[in-house]
Amino acid sequence: MWCDDWAVGDTAAELSGRSYESSARLTTVARITATQIVLSSGGRYRREDGREVGRRSTWETATDLCRPNDPRVVQARVTAATRRLLSGIDQARRANRLSTVDECNQLVDVVEQLLAQARRKITHLTSGDSAEVTG
């Protein structure tokens, strides 16, 4: 079967969307039945292929159960973090909170710290360890 190595308490990722628009939400495996993996988020996935239970139409946005270190999950999380970062920079600019060169340089320092943190997380996620990294 597709998911013989899943266990209750494992960290799982619900990957939704299509390629460039994908989003990933981390959750945990709450229960495993003979045919399904049930997540603490309420999601239910078929053990045979990891597809969401109840999705039949190809027109609906697909949701798959994945490991947190799956490259598609990592890419979706990096993309979401980048969008949040750029949105924050744009909001600060629009609010005229970046009026001096020193303030802009301070923001760049913060961005560099966030990028370093993101690089550590990416390295950690792609190393095969699904635990979350902080700091």
Image (cartoon, rainbow, N blue to C red):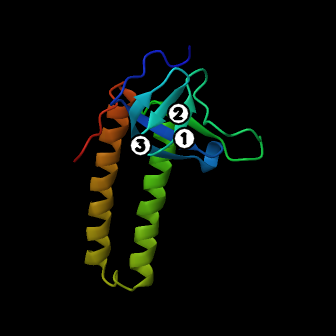
Which kind of residue does numbered mark 3 sit on? Leu
Q: Nearer the viewer, residue 25 or 115?
A: 25
Q: x, y percentage for residue 32?
A: 44, 26
* Residue matched to label 3: 26
**50 sits left or right of 13 in the view:** right
The earlier-in-sequence mark between 1 and 3 is: 1
Q: Is residue 7 above or below residue 99?
A: above
Q: Which mark is residue 6?
A: none
Q: x, y percentage for residue 34?
A: 52, 20
Tell me which corner region of the image, top left, top right, bottom left or bottom right, holds residue 105: bottom left
Q: Mark 2 falls on what kind of element?
A: strand
Q: Which mark is residue 15?
A: 1
For image coordinates 31% across by 54% down, the residue present is 114
Report if the CB atoms under discs 2 and 1 are less than 8 Å apart: yes
Q: Which mark is residue 65?
A: 2
Tell me which corner region of the image, top left, top right, bottom left or bottom right, holds residue 46: top right
